[in-house]
Amino acid sequence: MAASEQKVVYIDEDVGKDEPSVAGTEEAPYKTLAYAFQHHPPTTPGIQYLTRKSQTGPVEDGNEASRLEWKPATKSAMKKANSLWEQAKKKAAKAEQLALREKEEAEKRRQVLEEAKKVVIKEDPSLPKPVRIRLDETNPNIVQLGSPDGSKKGTRVRVLGRVHRLRPQKDVIFITLYDGYGYLQCILTGDLTRTYDAMTLTLETSMAIHGEMREVPPKQHAPNNRELHADYFTIIGKAAGDKEAITNRVAPDAEPHVLLDNRHLVLRGETASAVMKVRAAALRAFRKTFEENRLLEVTPPAMVQTQVEGGATLFQFDYYGEPAYLTQSSQLYLETCLPSLGDVFCICPSFRAEKSLTRRHLSEYTHIEAELDFITFEDLLDHLETVISRVIELLLEDPQIAKFIHDMNPDFKPPARPFKRMRYAEAIEWLREHDIPNEEGKPHEFGDDIAEAAERKMTDTINQPIFLTHFPAEIKAFYMKKDASDPRVTESVDVLMPGVGEIVGGSCRIDDYDELIAAYQRENMDPSPYYWYTDQRKYGTSPHGGYGLGLERFLAWICGRYTIRECCLYPRFTGRCTP
Ligand code: 4AD
């Protein structure tokens, strides 16, 4: 019903409704006067507003029906509704204006972009042929820097990469390009900024840029203190923008599971890629250190039919109808290599079906394991200290890696030698003295497994690497050799680092045949699948030992990462096997 036809508008503050289905009639009244004003403005000639509170209104002369009587709206109610109506009108006008402006702007942008499509850039054939470089190329024989004002010419280069940062300004676009090797500031000016591609450029777009390399002007900053003044560019692959832009997919404050689902995009970030580069450098450094110490690399199988570290964390699968497991550790295989290959190491994945979600447990991790022949327990500890120290030395010798480590973990210092050595029994004493209880909330007793939380508290308090040694046989794996001077304990070592806790587990191995058979029995293990391991003790046994180091834990310590999940490419842990 049109407003002009209705002269009387009804408002029932109790049962009326402010909604389009209601017409403001006696049968279908509105709820508020303000709403009635919006649909039947007080400027309508001869309009009248009748109101009532049919349920809660005052009862006159004891007559309930008096509530149903319609009365003209009071002056003050009219005034209030009028001011609300005026406000609503202003708001609506503003919104309309804004929508109009937005539409105009969108249209203007469409026109500008249409115009931009007509701007075609061509490479100037009179310019020197560009030299293709990676973004970290700083060799002055390949790239010479011109002066900031262009008075001295720099090398003309061709670079390929993706847009990492983008800062469009009037008539100039600053791009930080990245290519996995480095970052380079590139500057587009003139017609280059007026092209459709430049005006719609998005982060992660892949492109080629040609131009001259110059020093950055004084007091300005850019990677390697240089910038590329572009004279030509081409887009190779546009990256999604707007809602699909990478910054929306992996916002810095996103929930951890979102970041994990989008790990492939997170890996493009500076920190994630820095960790991966330190990881690669650590692998190089371990291999170099092992080579220096004459350990030979071998690659044992991942599919096995024996356990090493207890049945609780075995991943079992069907192997042509037989039960088999993903390896927990290559140790037993490494031991079999000693007679013919000498000391050996391997860098292979190990698998653990960990039941709990912690920040230092993965289901698949990179295990760096070594085995040394004809050694004492002291030799093993000395070797471990040498290897860890040398690897850190090699990492810090590389300026790029040292910078990554420093940026991520500014407080990192190579640990002082000799590393602190502490027997398990001393640790139990220490925990008692510091009132750190065991898992049951009671003071630690000799024989207790030192739980993760207690171990971390102790390591963080002592705040230096600890070689924790001589664990009781009952809480350690079946293969560990007993200490001749105290048969309650084994020649075993855990290396504990502040921030992460245990990064290495190692020991001397039982080398006596009968003792090993007794150990299988003690652990209720069927010795038959281990015949090849037992044979070691039958054919020229030797005192030997070794260790396993979790690469991700080592990296979490060096790079100051909260969880080891950040220290591998695509982490696998309870409930996650994607991407
Ligand atoms: O102490 P562990 O279980 O020792 C062994 O597997 C020995 N057989 C190794 C050997 O002597 N060759 O594991 C060794 C190291 C731990 O100190 C830890 O750094 C890492 O492997 N590790 C894990 N890392 C990530 N996620 C897990 N679930 C891990 N379990 C062990």
Image (cartoon, helix red, strand yellow):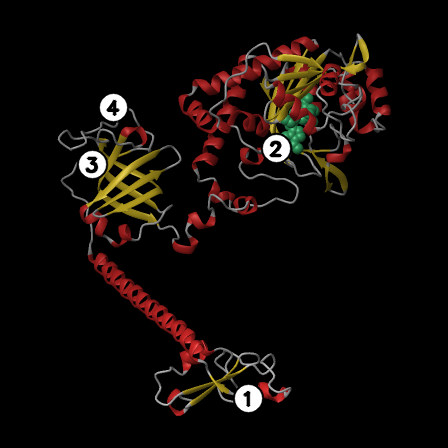
| Alpha carbon separation for disc pair 3 and 2 | 47 Å
* Label 4 sits on residue: 141
Residue type at mark 3 is Lys
To which residue does mark 1 refer? 69
Question: Residue 219 falls in which quadrant of the image?
Answer: top left
Side of 104 where 496 appears, left or right: right
Q: Is residue 257 left or right of residue 74?
A: right
Identify the residue position indicated by label 3 in the image. 129
Q: Nearer the viewer, mark 3 or mark 4?
A: 4
Q: Is residue 301 visible?
A: no
Residue for point 62% across, 32% down: 360
The residue at 47%/49% (across/down) is 249
x and y percentages locating residue 376 in the rendered image: 70, 8
Name above or below for residue 45 compared with residue 541.
below
Q: Position of residue 3 (x, y in %)?
A: 39, 87
The quarter of the picture where residue 152 lies is top left
Q: Amino acid at mark 2?
A: Tyr
